[in-house]
Image (spheres, helix red, strand yellow):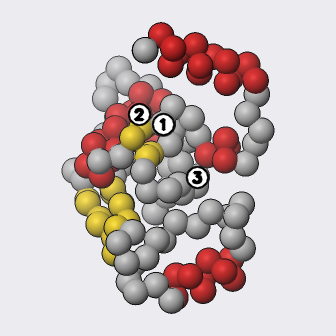
Amino acid sequence: IFIFWTGTCINNTSVMMFKKGSFEIGGTIYPVAIKYDPQFGDAFWNSSKYNIVSYLLRIMTSWAIVCNVWYLPPMVRKENEDAVQFANRVRSAIARQGGLTELPWDGGLKRAKVKDTFKEEQQKNYSKML
């Protein structure tokens, strides 16, 4: 079964938090890192900005869609690791291979209004880093 653990796709720069359900069943995970090269055409679809027809037209009229695909070694859950830790370890491996940034939130933020308390908490965290 081929599953995108984030439940969504993003703009080819980062990897969002994985949903833990796929990691709770205890099977072997075969991670795949996928990164598009936008040099000839951008495969990212911003569904809040473009409808499916305009996206398909853009894809079909692109010079080429170039994609790097890396098949990483199979990963299994460690003895003292919970599903969230396992998901984060797999996400880190994919991000490292693709040269992507790990994001600490999921795809729900693409569609939902961000709460002010969450914004304030993130601002405090970033100000501490500075």
Disc 1 marks which residue? 103
Q: Amino acid at mark 3?
A: Gly
Query: Relative to 100, is 83 on the left or the right?
Result: right
For the residues marked 2 and 1, what is the alpha-carbon distance in whole angstroms?
10 Å
Residue 22 visible in the snapshot: no
Q: Is residue 107 above or below residue 84?
A: below
Q: Report the label total.
A: 3
**In the rendering, which numbered label is found on residue 88?**
2
Q: In this view, which residue lies farthest toward the front?
A: 130
The kind of residue tagged 2 is: Asn
Question: Sequence-wise, which precedes: disc 1 or disc 3?
Answer: 3
Residue 27 picture quarter: top left
Residue annotated with mark 3: 7
**Label 2: element kind:** helix
Residue 47, quarter of picture: bottom right
Percent position of residue 105, x then y: 57, 35
Distance from Cα at disc 1 to Cα at disc 3: 14 Å
Tell me which label, 3 or 2, sits earlier in the chain: 3
